[in-house]
């Protein structure tokens, strides 16, 4: 009930007014009974039409304000109050039009009998009674589409029905039961009034209870008005004759009762307007202090602008922004306006003077007259004519970094809003200082980072987040490798074409194969060979590495790419290729001769002169075959580098190819189990013979580096427009420091003397990588030393090929 008491405390006058109304009504009724008993006063024919016309106009005004309240709050109570007063207005209007004394010569405009006017009199109070009762009991119309659709038709139909009823009463007035016998009330009239009096009294008590619970002032106004109406009708019952002093007192109580509601509602609307006007002014003041246009200025101009605007809004004669020096534990004057400009260097110790106390308290603080409070003097207030002073702390989080202070030449107090406005100015100033500090720090860090990457011997490029990837930081080495400026407006989609980046063979590089694109997808790409054609026509070969940059939550916020110029190495490779080609051709003839004579010796002496001779001939023949394969691989390497053969592409499924190859390879090993798993179709357009050689090479590699045998799993699936195949073994794995060189020819994947050592890596892996890249695909691996390796092959799906993403 705490919230109810809070509302009661806000409206004590209304509660006193209710009690005073009841007391005055009882007093007036008693005085009227003593003074007017039996006395007939002069009849004023204009009095009744005037009073009832006012009541009709007041009723319509109250109904309009109540329905407006319903439209704003969607509370059903004002709706029914409005309906009740609309009914009162209709019957009050017909009452006036039916008065016999309305026109000279007797007779009203719509009726001629005084009894008809009495009917309208009773009906207007009855419909008001029902309207208030509905407001207290009915929950409709509640917020929602149905209420929006029916509230206005309900009002119009109700008003039309009351007008129709009034017209029928006027037409058939002689058929109405009599309420008057001459000019005296009969028993039906007294009974009707006797019901209305306790009814209004009970509703008044219910309205008081509702007001105490909800704090809705409308029920407070109704409680007062209904009390007056109850006593007004009570005068009719107490009065002995129709036109005695009670009659005029009754009309006076009507006017008072309706005036309470009307002026109460009007006062609420005026108060609402005043509050909204004050809020608008306060909002305008806050917006002026936080004007985004101020942020367009420099840091120093922004602080000065905040100080000047805050001083102008509050009407200050001067002001200052003092920043905290933590080392000296004192505030130093940074900005000043008005009379404070005349001051020289100002320093205030924390805890001394008003500004020092604001900093020590970490809260707003003001004094009405600083000349009467020496504790607020500080170093300059006591020596000047400054009277009122108010200050607020400038904070970053809970840490005070300064104080904003305003001075006035006259004593005055400050409202909570003025305190809050100064706090807003202090917060805005503190934010500006913090932003400037963070910007300076970011610029220093960027400068340090730029120096760091500029001194790096390789090209470095930092890219922004994946939603709008652009180069945001790069070094001179990167531009030297590209042979042209690196433009931030060139995105990844057009980067390969703009910078003329291709595969080493000169074939176009798809945009999604760019190192930065791979990193922004979350992949770490190592040892990717590319060729860049500079504007001068020079071809530069680079070794690219890329990795994603992640924030604390693991989300990708950018990528880093390094480019290493390996053109000199490529030139050496060219010489090596020429040597290999020459050596291979030179070796072919003696190897052929050796193999031929070995075969002849086997034919001349099939069993050999001795058993060991036959074994020696077999070894010579096998090694000759091995040398022949190596020579063929060497020639294939040179051919793929210099004049790659045309690819004979056809449509086939990688899974079908794996089903054909695996049984043939399985025959060559008894300690390994080759297992195929096909998750989805993987149709490709590729050179089937070349891809078969790649798959055989991957399987041979897995068998070779799994000396203890075990399962080798081949998985085929499709995803994101790519057909994928993986070969997983559980062998010796590849040391991390050797992984970047696995696809290099003549490289040892495993250190000599360790399990699984087979000398240099076969050229087949290098040839496989070249073959896959010529198809627009990728060949990569994941490996952990001692736990095995998994090699992955990806090729673009054939058009209209099936596959799950």
Image: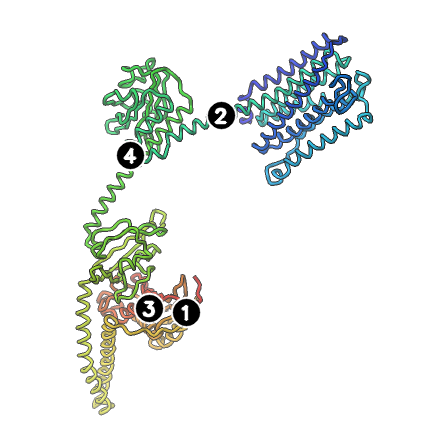
Quarter of the picture holding the C terminus: bottom left
Q: Is residue 60 left or right of residue 288?
A: right
Label 3 vs label 2, nearer the camera: 2
Mark 3 and mark 2 lie on one chain; the one further toward the N terminus is: 2
Q: Which residue is mark 3?
A: 775
Disc 3/disc 2 C-alpha distance (Å): 75 Å
In the rendering, which numbered label is found on residue 275? 2
Residue 425, position as x, y percentages in the image: 36, 29
Q: Which residue is mark 1?
A: 683
Mark 2 and mark 4 lie on one chain; the one further toward the N terminus is: 2
Front residue (pair 621, 687): 687
Disc 4/disc 3 C-alpha distance (Å): 57 Å
Labels 4 and 1 touching (C-beta < 8 A): no
Instruction: Indicate the colouring scheme.
Output: rainbow
Disc 3/disc 1 C-alpha distance (Å): 14 Å
- Residue 23 visible (yes or no): yes
> In what element is the residue under mark 4?
loop
Q: Is residue 723 left or right of residue 171?
A: left
Residue 588, position as x, y percentages in the image: 20, 80
């Amino acid at each position: 009930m705490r919230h109810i008491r809070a509302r009661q405390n806000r409206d004590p006058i209304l509660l006193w007014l209710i009690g005073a109304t009841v007391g005055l009504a009882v007093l007036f009724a008693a005085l009227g009974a003593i003074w007017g008993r039996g006395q007939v006063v002069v009849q004023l024919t204009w009095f009744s039409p005037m009073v009832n016309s006012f009541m009709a106009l007041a009723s319509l005004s109250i109904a309009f304000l109540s329905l407006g309240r319903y439209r704003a709050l969607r509370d059903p109570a004002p709706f029914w109050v409005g309906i009740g007063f609309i009914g009162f207005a209709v019957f009050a209007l017909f009452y006036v039009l039916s008065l016999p004394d309305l026109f000279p010569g007797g007779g009203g405009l719509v009726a001629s009998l005084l009894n008809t006017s009495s009917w309208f009199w009773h009906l207007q109070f009855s419909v008001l009674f029902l309207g208030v009762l509905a407001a207290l009991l009915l929950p409709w119309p509640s917020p929602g589409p149905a209420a929006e659709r029916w509230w206005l038709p309900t009002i119009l139909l109700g008003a039309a029905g009351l007008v129709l009823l009034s017209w029928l009463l006027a037409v058939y007035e002689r058929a109405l039961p009599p309420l008057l016998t001459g000019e005296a009330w009969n028993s039906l009239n007294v009974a009707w009034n006797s019901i209305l009096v306790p009814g209004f009294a009970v509703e008044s008590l219910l309205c008081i209870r509702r007001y105490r619970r909800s704090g809705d002032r409308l029920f407070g106004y109704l409680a007062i008005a209904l009390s007056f109406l109850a006593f007004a009708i009570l005068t009719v019952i107490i009065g002995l004759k129709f036109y005695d002093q009670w009659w005029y007192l009754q009309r006076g109580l009507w006017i008072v009762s309706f005036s309470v509601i009307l002026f109460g509602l009007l006062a609420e609307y005026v108060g609402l307007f005043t509050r909204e006007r004050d809020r608008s002014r306060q909002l305008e003041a806050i917006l002026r202090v936080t004007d985004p246009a101020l942020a367009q200025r420099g840091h120093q101009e922004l602080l000065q602008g905040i100080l000047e605007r805050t001083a102008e809004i509050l009407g200050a004669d001067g002001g200052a922004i003092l920043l905290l020096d933590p080392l000296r534990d004192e505030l130093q004057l940074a900005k000043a306006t008005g009379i404070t400009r005349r001051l020289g260097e100002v320093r205030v110790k924390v805890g001394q003077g008003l500004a020092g106390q604001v900093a020590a308290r970490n809260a707003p603080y003001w004094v009405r007259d600083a000349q009467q409070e020496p504790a607020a003097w500080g170093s300059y207030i006591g020596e000047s004519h400054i009277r009122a002073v108010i200050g607020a702390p400038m904070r970053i989080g809970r840490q005070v970094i300064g104080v904003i202070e305003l001075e006035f030449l006259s004593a005055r107090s400050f409202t909570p809003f003025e305190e809050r406005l100064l706090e807003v100015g202090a917060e805005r100033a503190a934010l500006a200082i913090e932003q400037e500090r963070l910007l300076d720090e970011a610029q220093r860090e960027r400068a340090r980072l730029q120096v760091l990457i500029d001194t790096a011997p390789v090209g470095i490029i930092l890219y922004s987040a994946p939603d709008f990837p652009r180069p945001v930081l790069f070094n001179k080495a990167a531009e030297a490798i590209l042979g042209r400026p690196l433009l931030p407006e060139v995105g990844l989609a057009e980067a390969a074409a703009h910078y003329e980046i291709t595969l080493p063979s000169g074939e176009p590089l798809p945009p999604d194969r760019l190192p930065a694109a791979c990193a922004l997808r979350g992949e770490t790409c190592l040892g990717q060979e590319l060729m860049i054609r500079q504007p001068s026509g020079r071809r530069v070969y680079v070794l690219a590495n890329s990795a994603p940059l992640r924030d604390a939550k693991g989300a990708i916020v950018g990528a880093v790419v390094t480019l290493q110029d390996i053109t000199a190495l490529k030139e050496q490779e060219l010489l090596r290729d020429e040597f290999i080609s020459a050596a291979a051709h030179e070796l072919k003839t003696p190897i052929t001769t050796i193999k031929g004579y070995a075969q002849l010796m086997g034919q001349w002496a099939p069993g050999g002169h001795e058993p060991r001779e036959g074994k020696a001939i077999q070894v010579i023949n096998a090694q000759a075959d091995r040398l022949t394969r190596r020579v063929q691989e060497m020639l294939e390497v040179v051919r793929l580098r210099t004049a790659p053969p045309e690819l004979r592409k056809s449509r086939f499924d990688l899974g079908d190819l794996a089903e054909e190859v695996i049984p043939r390879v399985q025959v060559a090993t008894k300690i390994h189990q080759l297992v195929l798993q096909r998750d989805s179709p993987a149709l490709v357009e590729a050179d089937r013979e070349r891809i078969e050689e790649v798959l055989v090479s991957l399987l041979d590699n897995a068998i070779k580096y799994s000396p203890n045998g075990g399962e080798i799993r081949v998985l085929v699936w499709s995803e994101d427009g790519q057909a994928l195949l993986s070969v997983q073994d559980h062998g010796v794995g590849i040391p991390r420091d050797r992984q970047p060189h696995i696809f290099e020819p003549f490289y040892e994947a495993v250190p000599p003397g360790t399990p699984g050592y087979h000398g240099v890596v076969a050229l087949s892996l290098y040839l496989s990588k070249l073959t896959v890249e010529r198809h627009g695909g990728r060949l990569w691996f994941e490996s952990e030393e001692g736990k095995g390796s998994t090699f992955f092959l990806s090729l673009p799906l054939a058009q209209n090929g099936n596959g799950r993403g």
